[in-house]
C-alpha cells in the first residue's frame, strides 16, 4: 500500500501544481485528498486521471494521513500544522511560518536533503521562499568549489508568487489598459501591468522588505550562515517564473568556464549560456519546467574572484510545489516514514 497524502490549499496556485506534480512523478500515493477553505467545498480538481472533490480543512480527520503538503498561507499553517503533525502526519509547509524555527528543517533537496531527518522534533518541514529555492540550487555547487563570501541579487518575480488573485489582477489590468477602462489595484500597491514594483511583502525598520530579508535568512539556514547576501526584490508583469540577476564573490578563484562546467553537472541545474541573441532562458520558457536555468555566466572584473549570472525557474514548481514533493520523496527514500495503513 502507498501513502495517503493531503494537499491543503489545493485550489490555490501552488496546491494545483502539487496535484499535478504528484501525478507526473508517479508519487507512491494510493490516496490523495484535496483540502481548502469551506468556500471551495465540492470544487473538482484532478490528480492524474482521478477527479478529487475538495473537502474543508476544518472538518477533516487527519488520523490516517501520512504526508500533508500545506500551501494555504502562514495564518492557516500556524494554526493547523501542529494539529496535523500531532495526528502523526508529516507536514511539509510552503508558508513562511516555520522556516526559521530552529526545530523545523528548511529544505531544498539538492542542497541539504540530509537535514530532513530533523522533522521528528515538530513533525513539520519548511519549504523556502520561491526566490531562495532557485538561488540556493545554483549557489550550492559553486559554494562547494570556491566558497562564497558575498552575494548581491536583484529579483524579477512573477505575479503568481503572490497567489491566484494576483494573476487575475495582472490579467484584468492588462485588459483594462487595452480597452481604456480604469485600472484597479487591489493585491499590488501600484499598477503591475506594463510596470515594475520594487516592493514585495512588508517594509521593515531598516528599509529592506521582508521578502529581501527572507532571502538572507533562508540562504544562511539552508546553505551556510557565513554567506553575506543583499537583495532587491522586484515584482514584474510576468505570470509565471522568477528571474534573478546574481553577483557572487568567492574566497577562491573560479572562472566562468569552470563555473559553467560545475553547474552543468549539478543536480537541478540546467545551463543554457550561448553568447548570442536568445542564448539564455527567460521565465516564459522556464514556466512548467522543473529545472533551475542558469545563463549569462561571466566574470566580474570589479572584484578578485567574482561571477555574474542569470538564474530563472518556475516559482510554482521549484519555488514551491516541486520542492515540497521532492522533500516527501527524500523522506521516503531515506525510509524515515512509513505508510500508516501498511504499518497497521
Ligand atoms: N506562489 C508561489 O510562488 C509560492 C512560492 C512559495 C511559497 N508560497 C506559499 O504557498 C502558500 C500558497 O500560495 P498560493 O500562491 O498557492 O496562494 P493562492 O493561490 O492564493 O491559494 C491559497 C490557498 O489557500 C487556501 N486557503 C486560504 N485560507 C484557507 C483556510 N482558512 N483554510 C483552508 N484553506 C485556505 C485557499 O483555499 P480557497 O480557494 O478555498 O480560498 C487556496 O487553496 C502561501 O503561503 C505562499 O506564501 C507560494
Image (cartoon, grey):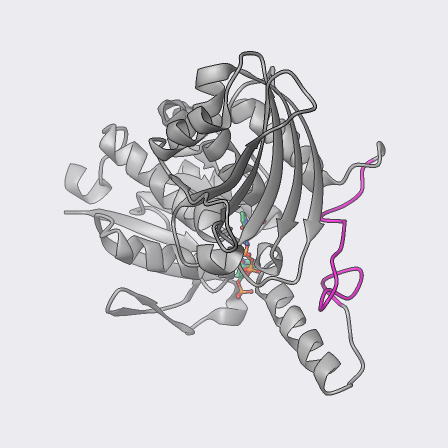
**Where 264 sits versus 115, above or below?**
below
Res. 7 in view: yes
Q: Is residue 231 left or right of residue 69?
A: right
Q: Quarter of the picture for ligand 1?
A: bottom right
Which is nearer the eye, 162 or 117?
A: 162
Is 91 placed above or below 41 here? above
Examine the rendering and report whether any part of residue 9 can be seen: no
Seen from the viewer's position, the closer of residues 198 and 108 is: 198
Q: Is residue 18 above or below residue 105?
A: below
Q: Main secondary structure of the magenta part?
A: loop
- x then y, percent, for residue 193: 71, 68
User: Is 152 a magenta residue?
Assistant: no
Give coordinates of residue 253: x percent, y percent: 53, 14
Tell me if 114 is positioned left or right of 190 in this view: left
Quarter of the C terminus within the rendering: top left
Residue 247, position in %: x, y?
63, 31
Q: Between residues 74 and 26, which one lies in front from this camera angle?
A: 26
x and y percentages locating residue 82 in the rendered image? 49, 38
Query: What span is colored magenta in the figure?
Result: 186-204
Amino acid at each position: 500500500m502507498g501513502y495517503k497524502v493531503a494537499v491543503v490549499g489545493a485550489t490555490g496556485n501552488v496546491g494545483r501544481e502539487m496535484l499535478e506534480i504528484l501525478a507526473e512523478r508517479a508519487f507512491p500515493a494510493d490516496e490523495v485528498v484535496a483540502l481548502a477553505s469551506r468556500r471551495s467545498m465540492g470544487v473538482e480538481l484532478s490528480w492524474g486521471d482521478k477527479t478529487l472533490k475538495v473537502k474543508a480543512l476544518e472538518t477533516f480527520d487527519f488520523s490516517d494521513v501520512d504526508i500533508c503538503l500545506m500551501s494555504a498561507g502562514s495564518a492557516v499553517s500556524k494554526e493547523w500544522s501542529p494539529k496535523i503533525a500531532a495526528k502523526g502526519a508529516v507536514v511539509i509547509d510552503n508558508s513562511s511560518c516555520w522556516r526559521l524555527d530552529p526545530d523545523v528543517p528548511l529544505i531544498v533537496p539538492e542542497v541539504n536533503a540530509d537535514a530532513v531527518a530533523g522533522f521528528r522534533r515538530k513533525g513539520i518541514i519548511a519549504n523556502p521562499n520561491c526566490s531562495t529555492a532557485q538561488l540556493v540550487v545554483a549557489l550550492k555547487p559553486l559554494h562547494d568549489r570556491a566558497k562564497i563570501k558575498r552575494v548581491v541579487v536583484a529579483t524579477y518575480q512573477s505575479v503568481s508568487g503572490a497567489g491566484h488573485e494576483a494573476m487575475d489582477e495582472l490579467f484584468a489590468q492588462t485588459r483594462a489598459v487595452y480597452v481604456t477602462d480604469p485600472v484597479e489595484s487591489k493585491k499590488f500597491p501600484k499598477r503591475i501591468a506594463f510596470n515594475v514594483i520594487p516592493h514585495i511583502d512588508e517594509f521593515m525598520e531598516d528599509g529592506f522588505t521582508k521578502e529581501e530579508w527572507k532571502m538572507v535568512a533562508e540562504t544562511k539556514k539552508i546553505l551556510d550562515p557565513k554567506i553575506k547576501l543583499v537583495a532587491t526584490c522586484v515584482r514584474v508583469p510576468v505570470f509565471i517564473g522568477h528571474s534573478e540577476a546574481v553577483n557572487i564573490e568567492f574566497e577562491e578563484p573560479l572562472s566562468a568556464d569552470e563555473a559553467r562546467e560545475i553547474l552543468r553537472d549539478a543536480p537541478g541545474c540546467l545551463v543554457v549560456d550561448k553568447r548570442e541573441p536568445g542564448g539564455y532562458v527567460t521565465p516564459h520558457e522556464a514556466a512548467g519546467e522543473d529545472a533551475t536555468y542558469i545563463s549569462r555566466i561571466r566574470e566580474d572584473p570589479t572584484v578578485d574572484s567574482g561571477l555574474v549570472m542569470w538564474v530563472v525557474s518556475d516559482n510554482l514548481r521549484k519555488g514551491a510545489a516541486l520542492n515540497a514533493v521532492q522533500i516527501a520523496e527524500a523522506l521516503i527514500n531515506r525510509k524515515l516514514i512509513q505508510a500508516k495503513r501498511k504499518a497497521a
